[in-house]
Image (tube, helix red, strand yellow):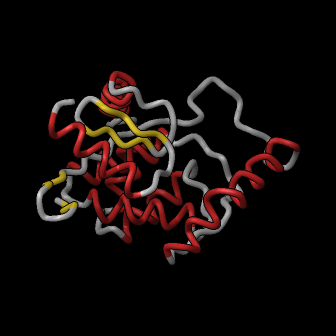
Amino acid sequence: MARLQAEHEVEIEWLPYELRPEPAPLPDIAGPEGDRFRANWERGVAPLAERFGVEMRFPPYKPRSRRAHEAAEHAREHGDFEAMRVGLFRAFFVDNRDLGDVDVLVDVGAQAGLDPEDLRAALEDSRYTERVVELEAISGRLGVSAVPTIVIGALAVQGVQPYEVLRQVLERASTGS
């Protein structure tokens, strides 16, 4: 539970959203598409990260995220979701690890306190696929079509937004206007 000023109590619920779902091909980051990703990173993400003191590096991978979401659901079921969520973000945006690789997910999970063999088995037998698909459907019904998306009441805010925008949306949602 996080607090936004004293008058609003905010509960954060993380839901999965796949940027690159099957069967669409993964982007070729070695070619022009990669140049576009890097330019967007340098224009948008990097300056914000620097401004707020967040350590981030341009990720050299654009993997499918389904298994990472399944690993996160495994962690949620075992009470280690927050540690796994932070570990996945760190692995991808700081350590530049491929979140499409099961060995990477198992390592991140072990660092988050999960039993590595149990996590590996869960990923290999697709134990959480159905749950992730259900949660992705909820994301879709909420209007999520980009990351990040923050849903406040019935209002969705996409992309990185200034504090003032989020505060106004929260106030609008809390008054029902």
Q: Quadrant of the C terminus?
A: top left
Place of residue 75 in the rendered image (x, y in percent of width and height, measured from the top left): 28, 54
Front-most of residues 19 and 36: 36
Front-most of residues 92 and 114: 92
The quadrant in which residue 164 appears is bottom left
**What residue do we see at 31% from left, 26% from top?**
138
**What residue do we see at 49% from left, 67% from top?**
90
The residue positioned farthest toward the bottom in the image shown: 53
Place of residue 91 in the rendered image (x, y in percent of width and height, measured from the top left): 52, 65
The quadrant in which residue 142 appears is top left
Front-most of residues 172 and 98: 172
The residue positioned farthest toward the right in the image shown: 31
**What residue do we see at 47% from left, 57% from top?**
105
**What residue do we see at 31% from left, 46% from top?**
168
Q: Is residue 126 left or right of residue 22?
A: left
Q: Is residue 27 left or right of residue 55?
A: right
Q: Is residue 124 left or right of residue 41?
A: left
Front-most of residues 176 and 51: 176
Q: Is residue 87 above or below residue 140?
A: below
Place of residue 102 in the rendered image (x, y in percent of width and height, measured from the top left): 52, 52
Place of residue 92 in the rendered image (x, y in percent of width and height, measured from the top left): 56, 61
Q: In which quarter of the image is the N terminus?
A: bottom left
